[in-house]
Image (cartoon, rainbow, N blue to C red):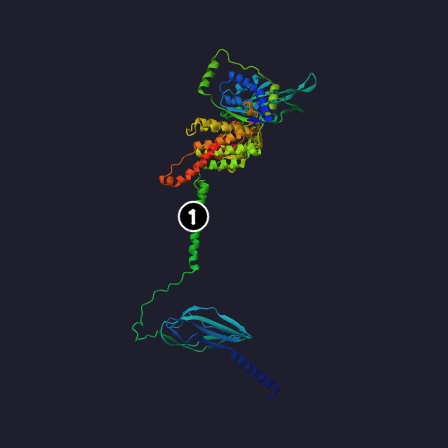
Amino acid sequence: MSQTVDIKELNEKIQRESSFVDMINIEMNKVIVGQKSLVESLLIGLLSDGHVLLEGLPGLAKTLAINTLATTIDADFSRIQFTPDLLPADVLGTMIYSQKNEEFNVKKGPIFSNFVLADEINRAPAKVQSALLEAMQEKQVTIGDETFKLEKPFLVLATQNPIEQEGTYPLPEAQVDRFMLKTIINYPKKEEEQLIVRQNIAKEFPTANKVLTKDDIIKARDVVKEVYMDEKIEKYIVDIVFATRYPDNYGLEKLKDMISFGGSPRASINLSKAAKAYAFIKRRGYVIPEDVRAVCYDVLRHRIGLTYQAEAENITSEGIISEILNTVEVP
Amino acid sequence: MSKTTKIYLLLLLSAVLMGNTIKAQVTLEAKMDTNIMLIGDQTYYRIKASFPKDVNVEFPIFADTIIGELEILEHFKYDTTYENDLVHVEQKMLVTSFDSGWYELPPAKMQIIWPNSIEADSAKTNPVYFGVMTMQLDSANPNAITDIKAPMEAPVIFKEVAPFAFGGLLALLLAFITWYVYKRFVKKEPVFVKKEAPKEPAHIIAFRELDHLREAKIWQSGDTKEYYSRLTDIVRTYIEDRFGVLAMELTTGEIIQMIKPIKDISPDAKDSLKGMLQLADLVKFAKGAAMADENERSMRFAYEFVERTKVVEQESSEEVEEDSSQQSSAGSLQSEEGSKKL
């Protein structure tokens, strides 16, 4: 088997450039037990410049995982605990009058960091969510009449829990679409939980070391963009997203009444980006259908609207994605 | 006689002569279409009147008989025609009689109202004579009197059956619509299911497709990607049809995982399949350019994989005997082909 030069070179380049993935994994695994998919999702978001929304019950190490990832990278990190009385200025920053200089000075908010942890994002009212999500999309913030570009890399990692809906402000579909991935975190396995207990009752809690710089991330992102995606894979991605919009065209008539809206073109873009990042994590210079399928749930689950009928029949977006993946032909 | 008296007399004479002229123009007539009829037979009785336009004539009104022996079956509308200054009016009635004999229909009385006159004059039509005959029996013929004949069978015409036919069709249509709506929208099942012809065995289809692929010489013309796409599609379709694993919707890794527990596929074949699919993935998704011997080897493997895992159907002994000669020749061809391939 011989390969054309560019792919061979790219494979070698990726082998070299992706070595840090192992280092991050090692450092993360020191603190986080199990939750392999969570760590992978965070890495995909980091490498493909996409924001990540983590959803899981309280106590499943959502915040700890993000904290640990931020620790492994030599970059600015800030955490915002979203509460009902939070104001947009608390997130973005504001203008403060200086009596000494007799002028307004800009006081930047916690969003001016490389990594922003928006903890329990659904507890803040819509205007705060909107301010954050606008900054996520535009990667810039306007305070007063001055616009500030956010420093690269800029990554928002938000958490929310699916229970305790009282006093929460669920993210609207249009805003949740800004997140590249929505990762659901499940309970750890029995053995993993045993390790978690052991780790937490030990004398010292392990800490992660810094293994990466901001420049490494930016460089790695450029390499991820170079990962080769064949047109067959592109077509596969488009087929999957189209199946969420027009299921009857793919022999999925039974899903037609279950889906109120399907994935947007942003879903196709993010599915492609995430598949490339996943291939990079797996040390490959090209995308294969496995990569698409691996990231499909995280990319699409928050982009498929369910009808009342689907909710009444306990059909989830994950179930719909499974049906689609089991029906759309793999190239 | 004075001149004035002469004039009066002349005018009086003119008036008398003019009145007689008008009366002469009124004619009344009654007649039957036939004067002799069989008992129970039907004929028309007509009363006609011709009179100037400015004269009014009132026809007699009959109830259900004209005389006791002549029954009226149907009254028709007055038929009026105009001819110059005269009006011809005809009253027509369908009549019958069930009493034999000779009868006289009395003249029909009519009222005539002359112009510029208030009082009416009576006038009569002519009397009409007619006879009602019974059947003449031939006393010499003992069979002259016969039994009552059964009602005659009239041919069924479309107009008679149309309501029933259309009603039946409508009922069938309604029943079909009800069934269709129930099936399609309530049970949400396909309404018309095409009965599929029995499918060919998976290995027959696979062999045929592999033959086509080999004959197409795709990789030889430089399109290795298309070659591997078709080759893997053939193998995946075969796995789907043969083992029930939905291989067309699975990735290489998933296919390998799914066939792991299948005992009909040897471990060697599983390894070779994995190798071939991974090689195909490289060609298809990573611009990989496979060598000529790799392409040949993949094709050989595909043949071998299908050959080793195909379902061998048990045939009846008679069929085996009948087909033995054909099979032996085909088998030798196959083995020759196989030895070339493998």
Specify whether residue B333 is in view. Answer: yes
Tell me: B105 left or right of B221: left
Tell me: A278 left or right of B98: right
The relative height of residue A8 versus residue A211 in the rendered view (above or below) is below
- Residue projecting furthest to the top: A203
Image quadrant where residue B198 sits: top left
- Where residue A114 appears, x then y in whole percent? 60, 20
Residue located beneath label 1 in the image: B175
Chain identity of mark 1: B
> Helix, strand or loop at disc 1?
helix
Viewer-closest of A255 and A229: A229
Q: Quadrant of the N terminus of chain A?
A: top right
Callout 1: 10 Å neighbours few (<14), some, many (20+)? Answer: few
**How many numbered marks are there?**
1
Amino acid under disc 1: Ala
Residue shown at 44% from the left, 68% from the top:
B75
Viewer-closest of B277 and B42: B277
- Residue projecting furthest to the left: B142
Tell me: B137 left or right of B166: left
The relative height of residue B320 versus residue B31 in the rendered view (above or below) is above
- Where residue A210 appears, x then y in whole percent? 57, 15
Viewer-closest of B205 and A124: B205
Specify whether residue A172 is in view. Answer: no
- Where residue A22 appears, x then y in whole percent? 54, 18
